[in-house]
Image (cartoon, rainbow, N blue to C red):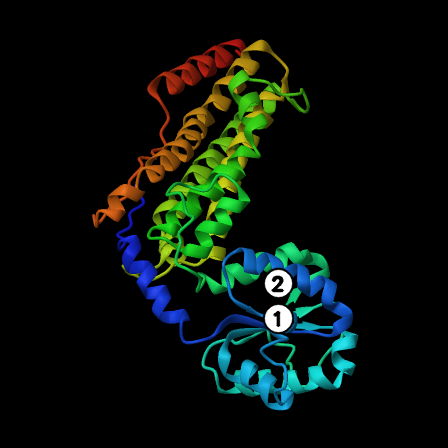
């Protein structure tokens, strides 16, 4: 199978984002109650560290000095900010100044074709005019770090000095991931997919090692009389799992996550979902093989059949493990080619099959078992 993408150069992508964000003085404007300042200040500091411009009252105290604040704040929330992040709490509901800010935010949101209000709940308070249907984040559960990361993801590219911090390879750490998602370089969708594949398969590395060692803690029992039906059931399962993996990688899920047409941006959430489902099927293959290896049997001949059946998962498991590593290595080298203006097709082979030696070993073990039952 192959995963392919055609992407513009980094320069073209950055010019597109630059044109989009310079219509506003601020990437976000925060509106909050003074009692919640400690939480909000931590969020603001993290978002600013990512290169975004934030309207935060303490930073603007000299600019607003002497101005009519009943006009100054509405101007910020209704015109000068790209998004408004509203930190909702019982304190926010009670303050007259936050009511003024809220009205300005809601007035702007009413006239926007796309989302403008980004609500963050710090408790269960419900505000008049802020509909329950609007998606919000739970500040307590997410913590300031999580809220800041979500804001950076929403903004996509900072209207800062244009300095790129992306190092041109698949991210290795959450910090590198945040930088890549903030800058959105060409082919970022495929690098994000590779990042999630590596991180999620890495969590299964111990189980992969157990598979390679043939280790399994004994559990369960399979009698000679049940062997035939068990083999039939497990054969269907292994074929179904391999087929599902191929469908995920070759089917419409990939197009939906990565973008259906050249130049169309992918969806970070769908990309992570796709990686998660693929790695889930990889984990199922590891489980399937381990469960067979863990079975106790009534005879040595039956044990040989079960071990031979468990080996049917070896090629798909090794193919998936190699695919994740090769895919990352390929994408690590893609940046210079994209910077040179080359249209790149990303293809990494991934084939599932039963090697002849494995099937012959199984057939031989099954014949020996049949002879022992006569």
Name the foreground residue: 147 vs 225.
147
Name the foreground residue: 233 vs 80.
80
Callout 1: SS:
loop
What residue does disc 2 label? 44
Residue shown at 40% from the left, 29% from the top: 322
- Asked whether the viewer can see residue 108, the reply is yes
Q: Which mark is residue 56?
A: 1
Residue shown at 64% from the left, 90% from the top: 70
Q: Position of residue 91 (x, y in %)?
A: 78, 76
- Asked whether the viewer can see residue 123, the reply is no
Where is the N terminus found, in terms of image quarters?
top left
Q: Which mark is residue 19?
A: none
Q: Earlier in the sequence, mark 1 or mark 2?
A: 2
Q: Looking at the image, do the residues carrying marks 1 and 2 touch, with CB atoms under 8 Å apart? A: yes
Callout 2: SS:
helix
Left or right: 253, with 291 as reference point: left
Q: Position of residue 300 (x, y in %)?
A: 58, 10
**Label 2 CA crowd tier, 10 Å (few <14, some 14–19, many 20+):** many
Tell me where residue 329 sits by quadrant. Answer: top left
Q: Position of residue 327 (x, y in %)?
A: 37, 37
């Amino acid at each position: 199978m192959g995963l392919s993408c055609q992407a513009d150069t980094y320069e073209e992508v950055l010019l597109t984002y630059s044109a989009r964000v310079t219509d506003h003085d601020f990437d976000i404007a925060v509106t909050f109650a003074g009692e919640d300042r400690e939480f909000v200040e931590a969020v603001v500091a993290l978002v600013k560290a990512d290169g975004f411009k934030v309207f935060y009252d303490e930073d603007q105290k000299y600019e607003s000095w002497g101005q009519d604040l009943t006009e100054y704040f509405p101007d910020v929330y209704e015109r000068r900010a790209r998004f408004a992040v509203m930190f909702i709490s019982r304190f926010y509901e009670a303050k007259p100044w936050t009511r003024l800010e809220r009205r300005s935010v809601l007035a702007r949101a009413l006239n926007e074709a796309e989302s403008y209000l980004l609500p963050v709940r710090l408790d269960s308070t419900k505000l008049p005019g802020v509909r329950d249907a609007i998606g919000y984040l739970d500040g307590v559960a997410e913590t300031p770090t999580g809220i800041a990361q979500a804001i950076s993801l929403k903004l996509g590219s900072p209207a800062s000095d244009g300095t790129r911090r992306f190092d041109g390879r698949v991210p290795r750490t959450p910090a590198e991931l945040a930088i890549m998602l903030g800058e959105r370089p060409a082919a970022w969708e495929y690098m994000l997919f590779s990042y999630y594949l590596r991180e999620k398969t890495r969590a299964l590395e111990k189980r992969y090692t157990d598979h390679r060692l043939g280790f399994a803690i004994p559990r369960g029992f399979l009698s000679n009389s049940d062997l035939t039906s068990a083999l039939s059931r497990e054969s269907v399962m292994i074929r179904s799992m391999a087929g599902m993996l191929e469908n995920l990688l070759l089917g419409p899920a990939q197009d939906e996550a990565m973008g259906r047409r050249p130049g169309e941006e992918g969806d970070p959430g769908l990309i992570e979902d796709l990686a998660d489902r693929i790695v889930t099927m990889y984990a199922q293959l590891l489980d399937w093989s381990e469960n067979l290896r863990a079975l106790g049997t009534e005879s040595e001949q039956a044990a040989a059949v079960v071990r031979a059946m468990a080996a049917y998962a070896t090629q798909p498991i090794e193919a998936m493990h190699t695919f994740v590593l090769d895919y990352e290595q390929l994408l690590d080298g893609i940046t210079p080619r994209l910077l040179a203006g080359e249209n790149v097709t990303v293809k990494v082979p991934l084939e599932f099959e039963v090697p002849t030696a494995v099937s012959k070993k199984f057939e031989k073990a099954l014949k020996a078992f049949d002879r022992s039952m006569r």
